[in-house]
Amino acid sequence: MNFEGLDPGLAEFASAMHSTLDPVLDAHLNPSLLQNVELDPEGVALEALPVQESVHIMEGVYSELHSVVAEVGVPVSVSHFDLHEEMLWVGSHGGHATSFFGPALERYSSFQVNGSDDIRQIQSLENGILFLTKNNLKYMARGGLIIFDYLLDESEDMHSLLLTDSSTLLVGGLQNHVLEIDLNTVQETQKYAVEIPGVTIMRQTNRFFFCGHTSGKVSLRDLRSFKVEHEFDAFSGSLSDFDVHGNLLAACGFSSRLTGLACDRFLKVYDLRMMRAITPLQVHVDPAFLRFIPTYTSRLAIISQSGQCQFCEPTGLANPADIFHVNPVGPLLMTFDVSASKQALAFGDSEGCVHLWTDSPEPSFNPYSRETEFALPCLVDSLPPLDWSQDLLPLSLIPVPLTTDTLLSDWPAANSAPAPRTILDCRRAPPVDAEILRTMKKVGFIGYAPNPRTRLRNQIPYRLKESDSEFDSFSQVTESPIGREEEPHLHMVSKKYRKVTIKYSKLGLEDFDFKHYNKTLFAGLEPHIPNAYCNCMIQVLYFLEPVRCLIQNHLCQKEFCLACELGFLFHMLDLSRGDPCQGSNFLRAFRTIPEASALGLILADSDEASGKGNLARLIQRWNRFILTQLHQDMQELEVPQAYRVAGGSSFCSSGDSVIGQLFNCEVENCSLCRCGSETVRASSTLLFTLSYPEGSNCDKTGKNYDFAQVLKRSICLEQNTQAWCDNCEKYQPTIQTRNIRHLPDILVINCEVNSSKEADFWRIQAEVAFKMSVKKHGGEIKNKEFALADRKDLGNPEGLLLCPSIEELKNVWLPFSIRMKMTKNKGLDVCNWTDGDEMQWGPARAEEEHGVYVYDLMATVVHILDSRTGGSLVAHIKVGETYHQRKEGVTHQQWYLFNDFLIEPIDKHEAVQFDMNWKVPAILYYVKRNLNSRYNLNIKNPIEASVLLAEASLARKQRKTHTTFIPLMLNEMPQVGDLVGLDAEFVTLNEEEAELRSDGTKSTIKPSQMSVARITCVRGQGPNEGIPFIDDYISTQEQVVDYLTQYSGIKPGDLDAKISSKHLTTLKSTYLKLRFLIDIGVKFVGHGLQKDFRVINLMVPKDQVLDTVYLFHMPRKRMISLRFLAWYFLDLKIQGETHDSIEDARTALQLYRKYLELSKNGTEPESFHKVLKGLYEKGRKMDWKVPEPESQTSPKSKAWDGTRETELDAAVFSSVLAL
């Protein structure tokens, strides 16, 4: 409400005057209101004061029901009916807030909001209350706890707020702008300029925003752009109040008279259909407040400050008989509000009293109010009878006196029962109430839910009897908000195994907390890229040390080489310190290979999102494909010197690739016809597929099969099939047998659990193995907690084998180690190998001389079955000592779970536990013990300086006259610490996928997929500073849906080799140039480099990035565009029609030089902070827009002559080009 023109006596109600009030009765107060009231020394009433005598209410006619004192002598500044609960909120001129519950106005809560300023508006939300003061917005719970406190600029003078949706707020005041604030991030998202300053009242309909100004005007603004659509000049003096209902707008205010402002008794009424005024409505009171009360008709309630209230129709005549009087304790009414149900009216006066008028004896404030939560009463004063037969009886109800004597329950140790030693004796916490999980809402990683009140607070029942005898750690109810409507006991997927997704906000990924999912220093992989289902297998290959070193030593000229792209990705994983990486370039090359498409390995986005494809079969086919493809790529030896594999490495072999040395297994395939003819052929395979015993699916008796037996049967496979016989010259039934000649260093196994038959086989074998383990240990198996305690007590001395726990033996059939031996008659012996066997037979290293090898389990890839999310793939990987040494500086081995960007250390038994209801094995990796000692693990960077030299363009029409850059000469090769200006432009391959929620907010499901289109690097020092040495346009074979010409400068045809006139190259060629610059240690200068490197798919150390977007940034303030910074500091006007990467890179370099000049090379942060403050003040005044007229110069034009420098650069460029 606007208080201009009101009684000047209100100015005397200053907060400082009320700090010394004496607890005496004011002459203006009605003595009946203060019966039984105790006043504290500051003069504030301690509890609500209902009227003592009963009041008769006539149905349908508003009458006073109750009056209470909020604060004695402190004027009420604002009142508000809660939109969610049966509560009335009152704010005072002293910054104090009080809430009253129900029509009886029982005091619910009371707390201080601001120490000096008055509360100007209150808005209720679902989880709390918003309070607006002069330059502060505070969000508090209904009990008084602060949720957030947003401090506005000191120069602001706010008067009104408007909640546009559940998470967006408009705040206006006496300044010439309106702020838009996001309640989720508590940040200012928009600042709308207002032509007429002084927005003190705001309303909203489904067509317009309505803003009431102190000048007496009402402006109608667009809901999207906030631009003025129409304007009503209501009063010549000032606006007091207005309201909107349907197609009518009614306003009251002050008109200019000879003696000053006078209250106008004519209400201005406007028709919003024709956008014109209709006949003014003359009333019989001096209107200060008005509200529509549309019960049966569109009635208007007009209130004067003296307490007169009149009801009338906005298009009719006012009847003096419709006037009733509110009896304020003070001389003036200060505030007025109407409940959402229109059954209650609230008035606040200048002496701190609140009056409630209703049209029924038992009114409700809202049509559908939720239940208000109260603190439970103290139960000590009235002790209930105790029924000892009830299991839910809380023993804390028994009051125990404070005593120093020994209590009866303090039994001596000799008489105490021993602690439970088995899993069935342990008392477990009960599951979370299903109603809590169903109604829970998540904010970040914290869940909030209303109390179902099924139990007393802070009490849980004792479970004396357990009905669930087969409890395991995976049968807990879900903690995820997904599928709350379903039965919680049906979900068995542990939380860390569920499919993880990235929640995108308005800032993209900047405010997503990846550290919550990964507290290690290893790098996860992002899952939002198409065909990222193979992330788990990429991690498996990375943590194979010989494979990692081999791949990073490889480099060839092939444009789409999976080995090269995998090496680049491995390099990023090496550099990362816990931040996630993305395999976009690798997956881009993967999609271009015809064999991948022919094998059905490339999923459509819809199939990948819905989980239609069988991920277990898919990843097993991908496993076979990637090993074959890497084997082929590594066999290419004829490459130029610049791209040759590091010489002197034992990886190189003239006959076979090292992938073949690691994974290849030589086998003999023998075909025996019934005529007696035998054919033997030699071949090789990179992996084996498990072949299960015939009829095992029907065997429910629990016949025991060792994993080693099944593996031997799968390697030395024997089967009957039809084959061509050269002797018979026709197809005949033959016996096909396979014998092994040579064992691989890495044994890869596809489990092929593709049906219920194989799943039942794994389940039965796990049950049999569990029973045998229990029998073997003689019933000494303990609960996991007690087993761990025993190990701590014993110190776990070397070589001592302790009894495993029940949890460690469940669902386990897979051994951690297997022992394989080649016999003299070309046979193969396979057996499970345990630590006890090693103690009995000695270390496996000694037996390798006799052809005996021990393979240790290194990784398992499992398929997670989850019907709610479509399933996912995760990997358990045993990370070796070398990786821990590089990342954490410690030497040990540890099993980890890799679930895209979620990485978590796990117990080793978890890697071999497969609950076939939701966790199905897909791929197994066994490696020879002491594998790393067999190979040279040195990595020699294969990228040489020659990649920066001149190269031919792919474009057929490209001419030297169109060259926009000059390659580096030999004497210009960059050194450590040199500056390089960088900028990149992008095009869009896939549009963003988003959904519109029911509350009108947008949620990003999948971000737009960008591809780099142009990369420019300019010299950062030397005589040719500012001249580009890389300006590559990147050719793409994928379809571009948006060239973003306005922002990128890329036009259709620029990336097409047939018609482009630009210097066109492959992404791999330019990527190698940037990788060389990163490896040599240069420092990149640019604006917004974080996004550039992310799309290019590069991991750059933070100390090599100088980003001007952060150099010229103040905490909790907006990021400033390069265009505005160039205008403000350099007097340059860039990015006129489109963006040019050469111009942007050169400008970023100049800005960095300016930063060093202003901050004295970073030695004077205080003086530079003042410069930034002036920058932000100028930006706010100009709405962050660069002025168009040429006559307007920047404030820093004298300090930096950017135009002169640009001309100098152009002259140098022309001279060098002429050479």
Image (spheres, rainbow, N blue to C red):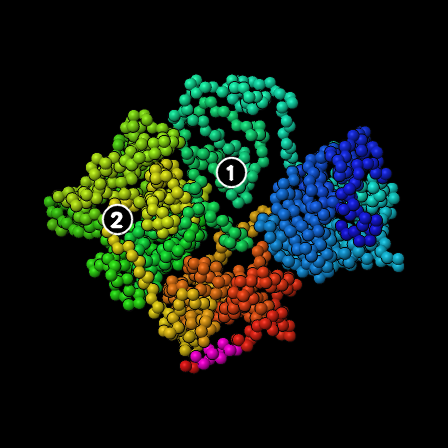
Element assignment for label 2 = loop
Q: Quadrant of residue 497?
A: top left
Magenta span contains residue 171: no
Name the outermost residue toward the right: 258
Magenta stretch, residue numbers: 1207-1216
Give how far across and how far down residue 574 sits, in percent.
Answer: 37, 54
Which residue sits at x=41%, y=54%?
A: 576
Closer to the camera in the image, 599 or 87: 87
Q: Quadrant of residue 780?
A: top left
Residue 484: which disc? 1
Q: Residue 110 appears in which quarter of the rendering?
A: top right
Q: Residue at x 21, y 51 (%)?
A: 684
Q: Position of residue 952 (x, y in %)?
A: 36, 73
What secondary structure is the stretch in magenta mostly built from? helix
Magenta stretch holds residue 1213: yes
Residue that appears at 34% across and 52% down: 542
| Residue at far front of view | 404
Q: What numbered label is drawn on residue 743? A: none
Residue type highlighted by circle 2: Leu
**Which of 440 and 1144 lies nearest the eye of the viewer?**
1144
Q: Is residue 1035 left or right of residue 1199?
A: left
**Kind of residue at disc 1:** Arg
In which quadrant is the C terminus drawn?
bottom left
Task: Establish if 419 lies above or below 947.
Answer: above
Which residue is label 2 attached to?
931
Residue 334 shows in this picture: yes
User: CB under 8 Å between callouts 2 and 1?
Assistant: no
Q: Position of residue 637 (x, y in %)?
A: 25, 63
Looking at the image, is mark 2 or mark 1 earlier in the sequence? 1
* Residue at disc 1, secondary structure: loop
